[in-house]
Amino acid sequence: MLEIFKVGHCWHPEAVVLRSCTLRKMQFPAYCGLIRHPSKGLMLFDTGYAKRFLKRTSYFPELLYRMITPMELGCKENLILQLAEKGISPDEIKYIFVSHFHADHIAGLLDFPSAKFICSKIAFQEIMRLGRIRGLLKGYLKALIPTDFNKRCTFVEDLKPVKLDFALSPFVQGFDIFNDGSLMAISLPGHAAGQYGLFCVQDSNGAFLVGDAAWTKEAYERSVYPSPLTYLIMDSRKLYIETLQKLNLLYGSGSGIKIIPSHCARSVSEYRSMNDVG
């Protein structure tokens, strides 16, 4: 069973992510997932925020990141503490799947010194090649990445591609993470270079963690596009729209697959309600 944790949040005007809405401030929770694999152990899908985000954005120019996306992380939202309440220590996390390298998805990587990472080679190369300013403009904070990341990482593109079940149409190709059909990495380009989602086959009907391919259920439910300003930080406007349209088709297909964006409280609440998960 997939468990979802809220690990901090930031604030944006709602019109930034839903073009037809107002400038009213909207909370964007940062969710990450905990997956219990029967033989491989515990895996995280992203990590959400961590207090070190505040430290890494204390000075100019990184301070601008914090000003544009003001972050809050309550004590009870600390991921390490939430896992501890479940009886899980950081060393028990065997894998972390990194959907993409924006700071609100990787700020906790340094808290798991024993974990192996799974991510896109394209995504990793992008954050490593960009300098301080250009990286910041794309939402990257290189200081959040462990220095031995490359040694502990498996790249999705190096895995064997597989044909996806028809229920996932229009998505047709994925990468079988553990070569057992339980977890499929699926390319979701546009928002960030090399962004991948993770389809959890073992979950009832399947849960599709889609990162920032959509920010809200309204976006994939009705193909509601964000403000044009958001395209300035995206990797590709064209690919973002294509990916969102695919999610809309998947949602309307009647497959029952649960689409869960990383910042959508409504999608997470519905998932928890369906699965009786607190």
Image (cartoon, rainbow, N blue to C red):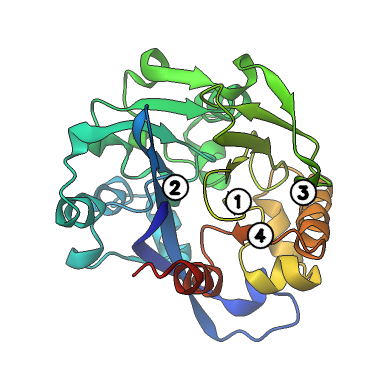
Which quarter of the figure has residue 44?
A: top left
Labels 4 and 1 touching (C-beta < 8 A): no
Q: Is residue 251 left or right of residue 89?
A: right
- Vertical placement of 266 versus 277: above or below? below
Percent coordinates x, y for residue 156 in the rendering: 59, 24
For disc 1, the marked residue is 208
Q: Amino acid at mark 1?
A: Phe
Percent coordinates x, y for residue 34 in the rendering: 37, 47
Name the mark nearer the viewer: 3 or 2: 3
SS under mark 2? helix
N-terminal label among 4 and 2: 2
Name the mark nearer the viewer: 2 or 1: 1
- Vertical placement of 122 versus 253: above or below? above
SS under mark 4? loop
Q: Residue at the location (37% across, 54% down)?
A: 63
For disc 3, the marked residue is 167
Q: Is residue 226 visible?
A: no
Determine crowd level at label 2: few under 14, some 14-19, many 20+ residues with C-alpha closer than 10 A.
many
Choose between 146 and 23: the one closer to the eye. Answer: 146
Q: Residue at the location (15% across, 51% down)?
A: 84
Labels 4 and 2 touching (C-beta < 8 A): no
Cα separation between marks 3 and 1: 12 Å
Choose between 244 and 70: the one closer to the eye. Answer: 244
Q: Amino acid at mark 2?
A: His
For disc 2, the marked residue is 105
Name the mark nearer the viewer: 3 or 1: 3
Which quarter of the figure has residue 152?
A: top left
For disc 4, the marked residue is 214
